[in-house]
Image (tube, rainbow, N blue to C red):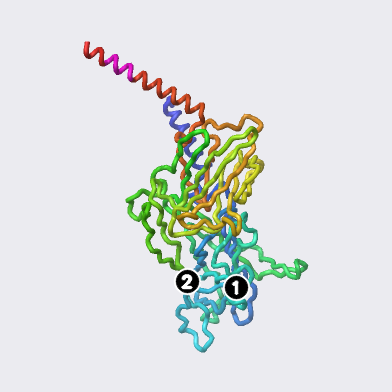
Amino acid sequence: MDLISSLDLVLTIVMLLGSTLFVSPACGYDPLDPNGNITIRWDVLQKPADGHHDVRLSIVNYQLFRHIDFPGWKLSWTWQNEEVIWSITGAETTEQGDCSKFTGGNLPHCCEKKPVIIDLLPNAPFNKQVSNCCRSGILSSMLQDSVNYISAFQMNIGSADTNLNISLPTNFTLGVPGYTCGDPFRVPPTKFPEDHGRRSTQAFATWNVTCSYSQYKASSVPTCCVSLSAFYNSTIVDCPKCSCACQGQTGAKCVKPGESPPVLHLGHNGVPKPVVDCSSHMCPIKVHWHVKQSYTQYWRVKITVTNLNHARNYSEWDLVVLHPNLDNITQVFSFNYKPLNIYGNINDTGVFYGIKYYNDMLLQSGKNGNVQSELLMQKDSGTKFSFNGGWGFPRKISFNGDECVMPQPDDYPRSPNKAHFNAQTTFFSSSLVLLVSLMLLMNVLY
């Protein structure tokens, strides 16, 4: 094997290893939340003699920083036989379906083959509530809210044919873009604490369904971008052009300066398509990272998140930032902050999110459509800290769990010494080209 063939083989192996080790979150795996998923738990509580089952369903968000926002989850499945939902508490189905097989005044709550179940509103009657219900289908993430990351409801299910055994349904879906659910699998029965934890009861049987998220399945295009600036350079590096769409592209709606946004008719069946301010990047969300000031032992950064979408507010928003100096973060002024220590001693990633009732709601595009905070970080005592080579800028930023488009490293604002060196190099190169051109011209003339 000659040298060129050997080099080709080595390059091929390196590319294969790279594609294996560095998997994009768009493929359903996020290295910043490797165990994150939403689990649907099916607990059979009772099996009365009449053939009905009392079932408790729990939707548990085990993701660290992804949450389910408005309009919430819409749980669905497919019954294997002729099962029906006789009654339900803590939720409701969107359709009753055809219950003509049943006679009498007491009809099932739902006879659909593929029922669609939604959470109740917060002001639901008390006799229709159960614990962890009635939040309009909104699920918080584990880091932001250690209580409201679970939804639950209870059902009494039976069959139109009393001689048939009730089977576990299949084809579970969450009704939230980007999530794909697997098949149910048996797990040890769930235990329920009673009497302040002094006693526990358990389910007859428990099955789990695991649902994973893919950014690409949620949206075929990015939904946010990052711009950069620094006190030592007057250049403001905007989001890359056409980060999320291009003006004039089919389906890309935007509002020009001075124009009024179109009247939006918002329903209950889904998130409206973005109607953004016209820009070179056409992204609904823009994150700006500004290196504001440098002190002897500390340096200061200002983060601004701007909503350019006229069609949506973002509740319980969050930012995931990857930067090597987050291990020495000293103070965050107007956001909450929690580190993501998922790989032991590597502490270079953190989650920023709003303060409840203050700035946890990112309003639609307009005067109040932004949130901002400053953070103070201590300079590393070793040789790690530097403004050269774009070190002061983040390596990665995600908004609500979706990765944002970053500028190219070559476009980062340069530090003064580097900028001065580049200016000198450019001047020298330009002068050399001019001198050579003059010499050639003299040779032609004389």
Identify the secondary structure beneath mark 1: strand
Numbered label attached to residue 154: 1
Q: Secondary structure at mark 2?
A: loop
Is residue 346 visible from the viewing direction of this image?
no
Label 1 – label 2 distance at C-alpha? 17 Å
**How many marks on residues?**
2
The quadrant of the image that shows the N terminus is: top left
Q: Which residues are magenta?
A: 434-440
Q: Is residue 378 above or below residue 183?
A: above
Closer to the eye: label 1 or 2: 1
Depth order, front residue of 143/434: 434
- Taking 187 as reference, is 224 above or below it? above
In percent of the image, x 43 and y 58: which residue is there? 310
The residue under label 2 is: 114
Check residue 203 in the rendering and tell me which mark sits there, or answer none: none
Which sits in the foreground, 50 or 105? 105
Q: Quadrant of the C terminus?
A: top left
Identify the amino acid type marked 2. Answer: Lys
Write the residue at 53% across / 74% down: 92
- Identify which residue, 152 or 114, lies in the foreground: 152
Q: Is residue 439 magenta?
A: yes
Q: Residue 98 location in percent, x, y?
A: 45, 80
Residue 279 in the image: state x and y as whole percent.
39, 48
Q: Are marks 1 and 2 in contact (CB under 8 Å)?
A: no
Q: Earlier in the sequence, mark 1 or mark 2?
A: 2
In the rendered image, which quarter is residue 261 located in? bottom left
Residue 418 magenta-highlighted? no
